[in-house]
Image (cartoon, rainbow, N blue to C red):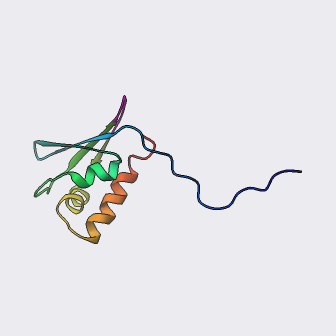
C-alpha cells in the first residue's frame, strides 16, 4: 500500500554562500553582502534615492539585474516602517531562483 504524504510546511533549504547586492543610482554605486537577498538589501544605506535604480544581485557565478522605477526605489531606500518592509519583500521576490 502507498505511504501517506506528510502534511505541513516544506523544510527551508539552508542558504549556503552569500549574496552580493550592488545598486546603481544617480551616478553612484552602493554594494553590500548578506546571507539572503533581503538581508543584503536591508543593510544598504542609500540616502535620497529619487531616480531609477539598477539592482544587481550576484551569488557565485549567477547574476541577475533588475531596474526599479523611481517610486519603487524611493519606497525601498528612503521610506521607513511598513512601506519599506513591503518594498523590501517585493524587490527580493524579483531575485527568486538565483
Is the residue 58 above or below the residue 54 in the image?
above
Magenta segment includes 38: no
- Total marks placed: 0
Relative image position of residue 59 (x, y in whole percent): 35, 36
Is the residue 98 above or below the residue 90 in the image?
above
Image quarter where the C terminus lies is top left
Q: Is residue 55 visible?
A: yes
Q: Nearer the viewer, residue 52 or 64?
A: 64
On the picture, is 96 further left or further right than 26?
A: right
The residue lying at 33 percent from left, 39 percent from top is 18
Given the current orientation, which residue lies at the most extreme bottom position?
82
Which residue range is magenta in the image? 59-64
Relative image position of residue 9 (x, y in whole percent): 59, 59
The residue lying at 37 percent from left, 37 percent from top is 17
Q: Nearer the viewer, residue 78 or 39?
A: 39
Classified by dominant secondary structure, the portion drawn in magenta counts as strand
Magenta segment includes 62: yes
Q: Nearer the viewer, residue 73 or 17?
A: 17
On the picture, is 26 further left or further right than 65?
A: left
Relative image position of residue 25 (x, y in whole percent): 15, 46
**Splitting the image into 4 quarters, where does residue 65 fall?**
top left
Q: Is residue 68 visible?
A: no
The residue lying at 50 percent from left, 46 percent from top is 13
Relative image position of residue 80 (x, y in whole percent): 21, 68
Given the current orientation, which residue lies at the most extreme top position?
61
**Splitting the image into 4 quarters, where does residue 21 fall?**
top left
The residue lying at 37 percent from left, 28 percent from top is 61
Is the residue 28 above or below the residue 75 in the image?
above
Amino acid at each position: 500500500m502507498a505511504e501517506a504524504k506528510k502534511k505541513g510546511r516544506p523544510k527551508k533549504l539552508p542558504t549556503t554562500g552569500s549574496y552580493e547586492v550592488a545598486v546603481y543610482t544617480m551616478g553612484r554605486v552602493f554594494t553590500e553582502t548578506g546571507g539572503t537577498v533581503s538581508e543584503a538589501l536591508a543593510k544598504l544605506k542609500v540616502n535620497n534615492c529619487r531616480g531609477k535604480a539598477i539592482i544587481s544581485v550576484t551569488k557565485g557565478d549567477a547574476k541577475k539585474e533588475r531596474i526599479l522605477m523611481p517610486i519603487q526605489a524611493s519606497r525601498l531606500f528612503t521610506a521607513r516602517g511598513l512601506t519599506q518592509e513591503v518594498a523590501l519583500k517585493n524587490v527580493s521576490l524579483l531575485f527568486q531562483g538565483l
